[in-house]
Amino acid sequence: MRIMIDGRYLPGNARVNRDLLITLRNMAQMLKWGIRYDAQRELVLINSKDSSMPPLPLDNPADERTEDENARLAGKVICLDPGHGGSDPGAVGPTGTREKDNTLAIALLLKEKLEKNGATIVMTRDTDTDVTYTDATSKEELGARVEAARQAEADMFVSIHNDSFTSTTAAGTTTFHYGGKDSIKLANLVQRSLVENLGTKNRGARFASFYVLRYTNMPSILVEVAFISNPVEEMLLSSVDGRENAAESICDGILKYYKV
Ligand SMILES: [Zn+2]
């Protein structure tokens, strides 16, 4: 979002969010400046001499809704981490499907949905590759994923995985967090949405000391969408519909987290 005062651009580009718009509007009202937000051009126009300019669309519920529909997550940077990749296939299902393919497919669908809502997405990987280099240690690999989120100054970190167990009857969805208040809230909302939409067994939103949760300094979760070792859930994870449904559910949980 750019800000223009009396026809001149203010240097820099701010992230659009509701709080900033409200602050600018209140400031303009106190100073008796004119202010207007042009959502199409993502531009705040300020006129210090003419307070008769129409107010920000925030005063108009109809305008606010239109803007919200396209930009509900505007200004949010979300880091998506498809588990495994490249030389690390992750878990392998009974028919040979691989966790790394399922996690990437779901993450790419999720990226699309979040971008439609105005979010900026950073992917730790967006092809079938190691994040660092072939045959890196898991610590190097996980460190690079955390670093990607840090460098992007992400507002949220979402790691996507498939669960696996020696018994093929183990089933269900789990969302892990590292205990922070916001991470717990996010985990609960994403978990609920996934279980409701996928119809999987609810294994709960739970604490875990996973590297990517421990070292990320923003709200972060690790989603075990379903068990790749379970023949029925393997189908869910490798099918177009199942992946679409999983991505939609995670997106829905994130929107609820931001209350938009
Ligand atoms: Zn995994």
Image (cartoon, rainbow, N blue to C red):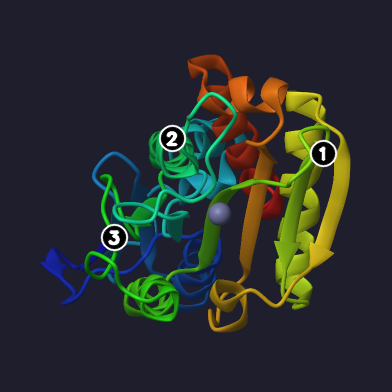
Q: Is residue 46 above or below residue 105?
A: below
- N-terminal of the pair, mark 1 or mark 3, is 3
The x and y percentages for residue 97 are: 48, 30
Q: Residue at x 41, y 80 (%)?
A: 143
Q: Residues within 10 Å of mark 3 (few under 14, many from 20)?
A: many
Tell me, for residue 170, which label it has, or none.
1
Q: Which quadrant of the view contains residue 5?
A: bottom left
The x and y percentages for residue 198 are: 73, 25
Q: Residue at x 87, y 40 (%)?
A: 202
Q: Disc 3 on helix, strand or loop?
A: loop
Q: Which tag is nearer the camera, tag 1 or tag 3?
A: 1
Q: Is residue 258 above or below residue 32?
A: above
The x and y percentages for residue 173 are: 76, 42
Q: Residue at x 23, y 45 (%)?
A: 41
How far apart marks 2 and 1 lie (CA) works out to 40 Å
- N-terminal of the pair, mark 3 or mark 2, is 2
Image position of 196 (left or right of 7)? right
- Name the image quarter holding the N terminus: bottom left
Write down the residue under mark 3.
Answer: 130
How far apart marks 3 and 2 lie (CA) works out to 33 Å
Q: Amino acid at mark 1?
A: Ala
Residue closest to the far left? 8
Q: Disc 2 on helix, strand or loop?
A: helix
Q: Amino acid at mark 3?
A: Asp
